[in-house]
Amino acid sequence: MQRLDLRGTVLETTDLAHALPRAALDTSKAADQVAPILKRVREEGAPALYDLAEKFDRVRPASLRVPAQAIADALVNLDPKIREALEMSIAHNRMGHTQQLPAPAQVQIIPGGTVSQRWIPVERVGLYVPGGLAVYPSSVAMNVACAQVAGVESIALASPPQSEFGGLPHPTILAACALLGVDEVWAIGGAQAIGSFAYGVTDGDDVLKPVDVVTGPGNIFVAAAKRLVQGTVGIDAEAGTTEIAILADSSAHPAFVAADLISQAEHDPAAASVLVTSSEELADEVEAEIKVQAQATTHTERILTALSGPQSGIVLVDDVEDGLTVVNAYGAEHLEVQTLNSRDDALKVKNAGAIFVGSYTPVPLGDYIAGSNHVLPTGGTARFASGLNVMQYLRSQQVVEYTAEALDQLSDKLNTLAIAENLPAHGQAALIRRTAAKDGE
């Protein structure tokens, strides 16, 4: 892994943003490749989707919508151990997301005048589950459980068609849908799936109605597509290719740190794994561990490609406080804090999609079964974006109610402000009610 030595350096956030390891391809560049795909989906509909499936997924599905029988069969054929693990993941996700639900509130501004706030779920969402180098039934659990807890009534899910499975999404994806009660599943992948959610698609008798919100992880092209359709639909974070940063000091266990860096590098050759440490000795030990552990796992070449890429590296700092400055500038999708005072240090982190505290909270725990959500902002967008949560599926509505007496109490001041803004009809809308009240109307 490349090294960046920042010891003895005055750390400025603006400088760090450019100096730290980052993936070479950003969302804005990917958008140039994605825009024509979205245009085809919008203008051509289903024929374009079949062509794009052949081009990108190397298979032409028999139909875009997955038959109900295929979903039912996938559950019947699911390995019982996988089913048990998925059921636990779903249960934990429902528990974790339920505690996020906001309570309605009401405040009395003056006697007879109240403002209430209530939370209304969107009517329909489109959930994307990637294919690519791995299969992600865990993403089904993360997306669907969150939307269901929020109260969304109509859920559509898309995942790439797989040539190995006759143009259907991976059967484990379909089985997870069955466990969650999702019966609207589409064999559409990549940016074209995001476009289908945004614009809607008709394929014979099958109609994918446009959605209100699109959520779910994916590669850089999925993230770019979500950015381009934002405004037509709501989106969650731009969850692109995965990344992990680990803040560690000399108290960290090098084998644990190495294993966690490897775990995210396993996703994709473009995945980012960054260690920020105040201990050069730990850095050396972690690199030695990586050499051993990477050879002992299944995806050695993919892992080593990711760890040796420009998006990964080891950053040396003088102390943990400087390390906190670095990780806040980086804004990682996943941030592990493996320091002597990990809980206190984690409280000082401002920018991260999710924070994993202590040596026994590895990122894969959150990937699968912790009860948190693994759909998280990448590419530094954690500075302003949040991971997937129930709020992505909820809208806040204010309900205002005043009695005649309460309105009368405020009408003069309301009218004063209306005149000051040269909008006298605003004031008259209040004053006319005062006159009507006096006349007994």
Image (cartoon, rainbow, N blue to C red):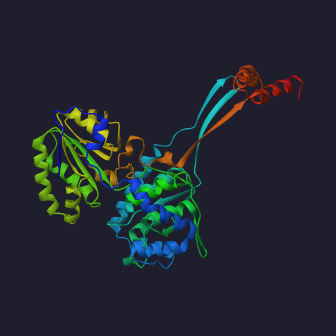
Residue sitting at 29 percent across and 50 percent down? 22
Count of residue discs:
0
Q: Position of residue 434 (x, y in %)?
A: 82, 24
Report whether 163 appears left or right of 274: right
**257 and 29: which one is in front?**
29
Q: Position of residue 301 (x, y in %)?
A: 20, 65
Residue sitting at 50 percent across and 43 percent down? 101
Q: Position of residue 363 (x, y in %)?
A: 29, 50
Relative vertical location of residue 123 with respect to residue 252 in this rendering, above or below = below
Q: Residue 381 falls in which quadrant of the image?
A: top left
* Res 289 visible: yes
Relative vertical location of residue 166 with respect to residue 343 in this rendering, above or below = below
Specify the quadrant that holds the C terminus. Answer: top right
Report whether 36 appears left or right of 2: right
Q: Residue 435 falls in which quadrant of the image?
A: top right
Relative vertical location of residue 298 with respect to residue 351 in this rendering, above or below = below
**29 and 410: which one is in front?**
29
Relative vertical location of residue 170 with respect to residue 338 in this rendering, above or below = below
Q: Position of residue 391 (x, y in %)?
A: 50, 45
* Res 216 visible: no
Report whether 169 appears left or right of 203: left
Residue sitting at 44 percent across and 73 percent down? 53
